[in-house]
Image (spheres, rainbow, N blue to C red):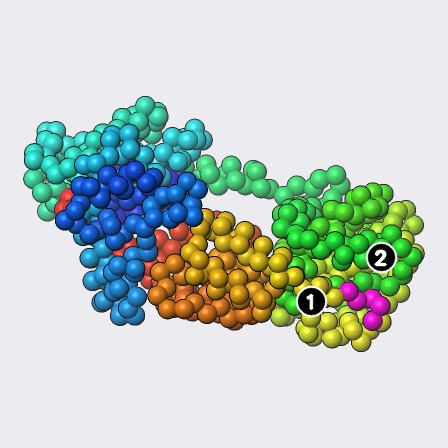
Amino acid sequence: MYISESRELKLHTSTTAYSPSTSVTASYYLGKQSIPWAKKLRFLEAIHALTLTTKSSKSSYVLDSDAQPPCYRLRPISCHIPGFKETSLEDREKAFAEWATEIDKMLAVLITVFSQELRDTYLTTVVEQEVHNTVFMSQELAKRCIWLNRVYMPTAKTPDNMSPGEAEAHRRLNILQKDLRNQLTEKHIVRIPVKYVEGGLNLDILEHEQYIAQVTLHLKKHLTEMTDTIIEEHQSKTMLKPSYGIEASLFEELNQQTSFCQKAAQCSINREKTINEIKSYITGESTSPLVIYGPSGCGKTTLLARIAQCCQQWLPEAFLIVRFIGISAQSSTIEQLLSSIANQCSILNYGHKCYCTHNMETYTAILPSLLTASCLQRPLILLLDGLDQVRAYSSKNIDWLPIQLPDNIKFITSVSEGSDMHSDISKKLSETSFIKMPLLGETEAKGILMSSVMQYNHSVNSKIQDCVLKSVQECSIPLYSKVLAWQTSWWVDKEDDVIPKGHVNDQLNLMLEELESIIGVTQVQHALALLTSTKHGITDSEMLDLLAFDENFHSSSTYGSLPSP
């Protein structure tokens, strides 16, 4: 959804410019053009030839010989404008102003050097990108777009003596408006006439005040209609319905668990020795539960996800019940977990959900009989990942955990090493019921690290590479390697030595501390609050939309100065 006015797009209204139903573009102002993040070698050489008296392009771009093909990349701002590293807001705002001046100089050069084709490719604006990536790429989204077209009476004249940058923006704007006319139907274009006055809108003029009232009325009408339609469509698609005789809530639970399992299995690393041990347990005669334990981030979840897939090959006739603790509402506490498992077993056995009192005592009493009834038909494999990851208000009672299993049943769970749950289970089961997750070898850890580094950064300088590779010698946990790899993208402009922490929790704390220093403590807190309050996670674009409404993220660094209307 984009909201645009046909004369200028005001950055302070960009909070509404990316919601899902309407689109508005400008007539004389499209917003700041983006400077290319990476350019081919010949482009920058041409720029250097024309900017011998300007340092902006030379200092802003650096040759990345490691990239394929080699290219010049835009350096972090703090590399050549030290003010961005200051903690003072005033110093950082001054640095931003300096950077804005540099951008204007660079854009003037790029517009002069680039052909029209290259300008269309590289010098785009956020407004153009958003309109093209949604309205022009999807007929469905085009139906949810409304273009508010301000029509001046008489027609406003094209400004004289425009600078190269203004002329380029005017050219791009005309193209965008033409494309919108071709793409949108008439009912999605609202043309509202207004008296032209030098200097733009003025609420002291009666006609302009009436124009604003009309805009508000039309916008409210269209947004209400579109929002109602979107809600109705969403409800019809997401309405929980029983499927194959399975209650809607349980069916949703199984879908969520299955979807997560498939994704987690794709991230699994080489653990063939441990997998073979688990295979021997599943296909063997053992009647005790099996517990996989290891430090947080060592790969227990991805391992069990892979085991769940392998079970279809090892015992294709077996019932498989899989739960990843905390992935869904019905797996957040021990009580909810046992209720969900009891319902699934009851459906497998009797064709209906389990009707019983919702408490630990009842589930502890009926679960053995439900499991026994299930295994009379087929083998049953129960996989529970992260048993110690239940919510703080959950019961921690493990009386329900069987010491001896009926024949034809296999029970595999995982816990974090050193957790209270691990300690309690260790007192209940014998040592032969435990398998410790082996740590990655140094070579494997380095492989994960470098593949993740290239995924996040495409390339990284040798100094940082040597530093992080040395760090995985101290901590070879897969999660640590991935967190470290992601954080390397923040260290490109570090002038001092980078010192990885060598521990997952310490590295995560460092990451949050650096985020706080970059964007502020309050901003990080608000972003994390949004993440933790979502039911099924949040996408990058959704997060940006929500943060755009948060005044703590508003500053001259994010909402630049605008031309007068």
In the figure, residue 323 lies in which quadrant?
bottom right
Instruction: State whether residue 63 is above or below residue 184.
Output: below
Please give the residue where the numbered disc 2 appears in the rendered image: 281
Left or right, 305 with reference to 525: right
Q: Residue at x 20, y 62 (%)?
A: 94
**Range shown magenta:** 431-435
Q: Residue 443: x, y in percent?
A: 62, 58
Question: In the rendering, which numbered label is found on residue 294?
Answer: 1
Q: Residue at x 85, y 57 (%)?
A: 281
Closer-to-camera residue (528/509) = 509
Q: Residue at x 36, y 43 (%)?
A: 71
In the figure, residue 190 lies in which quadrant?
top left
- Mark 2 lies on a secondary structure that is helix
Instruction: State whether residue 457 is above or below residue 398.
Output: above
Q: Residue 427: x, y in percent?
A: 80, 76
**Can you say which quadrant of the picture contains the N terminus?**
top left
Q: Note whether residue 281 is visible.
A: yes
**Can you say which quadrant of the picture contains the C terminus?**
top left
Instruction: State whether residue 62 is above or below residue 188.
Output: below
Q: Residue 247: x, y in percent?
A: 71, 46
Closer-to-camera residue (380/205) = 380
Q: Note whether residue 362 is visible.
A: no
Q: Residue 284: x, y in percent?
A: 89, 55
Left or right, 412 with reference to 108: right
Answer few, some or many: residues within 10 Å of disc 2's Cα (few below 14, many 20 plus, some between 14 and 19). some
